[in-house]
Image (spheres, grey):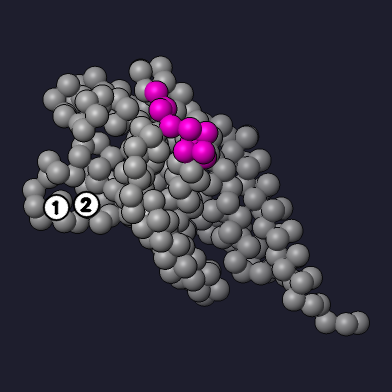
Amino acid sequence: MSAPTAGSKAAWAVSDTLLLTWRNLVHYVRVPQLIAFAVIQPIMFTLLFAYVFGGAIATPNGNYVDFLIPGVIVQTVIFGSMQSGVNIAEDTQKGIMDRFRSLPIARGTVLAARTLSDTLRHTVSVFIMAGVGFLIGYRFHGTLGDALLALGLTILVGLSFSWIACTIGLMVRDTQTAEIAGFTWVFPVVFASSIFVPVATMPAWLRAFATHSPITLAADAVRAWSLHTPVGDAAWQAALWCAGIIAVFATLAVWRFRRLT
């Protein structure tokens, strides 16, 4: 019997990834509360900032809702990506990862399927948050091409942060710890960005960090496409950040997955 070729191995890896992705999506269908609770917090942030703080925050275009919603959409996928680590930790805790590791599949397919299924969940969350924004007065001023670019970058941000969460989930291997470890670092990083306020209003030391944060770059790019204003360097810099994050943390996650005991 001839040895499998590189092409057949790649085809098997893709097939295994899609099969495991389907398994994860079925889980979301059977437990729809996971998606519901994933968007409740961003909706609360939207309403609080729009109606409580919005009147006190000055924005370049003068319309705080149009400033806020693109940023909140980015925040939604970032917070939602932390669920990837919780799911990975849960599968590890229940012994499901041991079963996956005993199967003749590439080690990366399990993690790729997790991030892919969660990326699809992020897409649903994006449209839900856009709908909520529309109800409170948000309007997209860009073109169809702008909308597709904004959606693509937002999903890329969610994918990259899902790989970070997967690495954390494999490191801690406990659902409660994975949730705490994920949100402990991501919460301040999200707020130290241009999602809710212009970075120009921040102290100089914080502004220096926030200006170059991938979250700020992504929020600024999505906001520019939404308002149909020049994007500048924010889009490609955010995409470069995301590519680097995926390269580093996908490697770390696969390395950690191979060493599970």
* Amino acid type at mark 2: Ala
Q: Is residue 211 above or below residue 74?
A: below
| Label 2 Cα neighbours within 10 Å, binned few <14 / some 14-19 / many ≥20 | many
Residue 173 showing in the rendered view: no
Of the numbered discs in the image, which one, if any, rests on residue 142? none
Q: Is residue 77 above or below residue 13?
A: above
Identify the residue shown where x is 17% and y is 21%: 55
Q: Is residue 64 above or below residue 239?
A: above
* Amino acid type at mark 1: Leu
Quadrant including the N terminus: bottom right
The residue closer to the viewer here, 177 or 223, is: 223
Of the numbered discs in the image, which one, if any, rests on residue 206? 1
Residue pointed to by mark 2: 210
- Quick one: SS at disc 1? helix
- Picture coordinates of residue 122, whole percent (x, y): 50, 41
The answer to the question of whether label 2 and label 1 lie on touching residues, with beta carbons closer than 8 A, is yes
